[in-house]
Image (tube, rainbow, N blue to C red):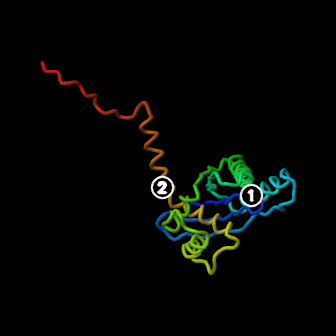
Amino acid sequence: MRVLGVDPGLTRCGVGVVEGVAGRPLTMRGVGVVRTPADAELGSRLVAIEAGIERWLDEHRPEVLAVERVFSQHNVRTVMGTAQASAVAMLCASRRGIPVALHTPSEVKAAVTGSGRADKPQVGAMVTRLLRLDAPPKPADAADALALAICHIWRAPAQNRLQQALQQARSPHAPHAPHATKGRTA
């Protein structure tokens, strides 16, 4: 499985491609950051992020896009910018028919480090170790994007089994449990 991880942001949007399957060594195929100037007009920044994501999609042909799920922070402006960059990445992938998976920051940290409360240096160190890199990717947004891709590769098999079980349970042709009858005796 080849996954493009996206750590969304308006100024720095981390991107990283990881290939592999759960239980086997993973391989980094690319890592970087799509940057936009903080003083540029919002519309042109979103267009620049779109162009950057499109280049990564063209070059790496991922099977899935894993994006950090936007969560409420104290700074509303930061949340809005993150959500807008996230939406651009999801739109680019969806336009091409590439499935999009969302993972919370704590899910990613827990998957990569074993603790949902790990800090950025811990995530960077584990990404470095897991992908057998010489040094942690810089800036931290790039390492976070790789962590998103790793998280998705490791979590996807279990998530797929859960989805299949839910679909079977909802199917009208799914086997039903025998109906219990109240204690009637003949």
Q: Which of marks 2 and 1 is nearer the N terminus?
A: 1
Q: Which amino acid does label 1 sit on?
A: Ile
Residue of label 2: 157
Residue 166 in the image, given as x and y percentages of width and height: 45, 41
Residue of label 1: 53
Distance of mark 2 from mark 1, alpha carbons?
26 Å
Q: Say if residue 92 shows up in the picture.
A: no
Q: In which quarter of the image is the C terminus?
A: top left
Farthest-out residue, bottom: 134
**What secondary structure is marked by label 2?**
helix
Residue 44 in the image, given as x and y percentages of width and height: 86, 53
Q: Quadrant of the N terminus?
A: bottom right
Q: How many marks?
A: 2
Tag on residue 162?
A: none
Q: What residue type is labelled 2?
A: Pro
Q: Given contact means CB atoms under 8 Å apart, are the residues at marks 2 and 1 in contact?
A: no
Residue 5 in the image, given as x and y percentages of width and height: 64, 60
Placement of 36 over or under 134, stated as above or below:
above
Residue 179 in the image, given as x and y percentages of width and height: 28, 28
**What secondary structure is marked by label 1?**
helix
Instruction: Specify few, some or many for label 2: CA neighbours under 10 Å numbering under 14, 14-19, or 20 or more.
Output: few
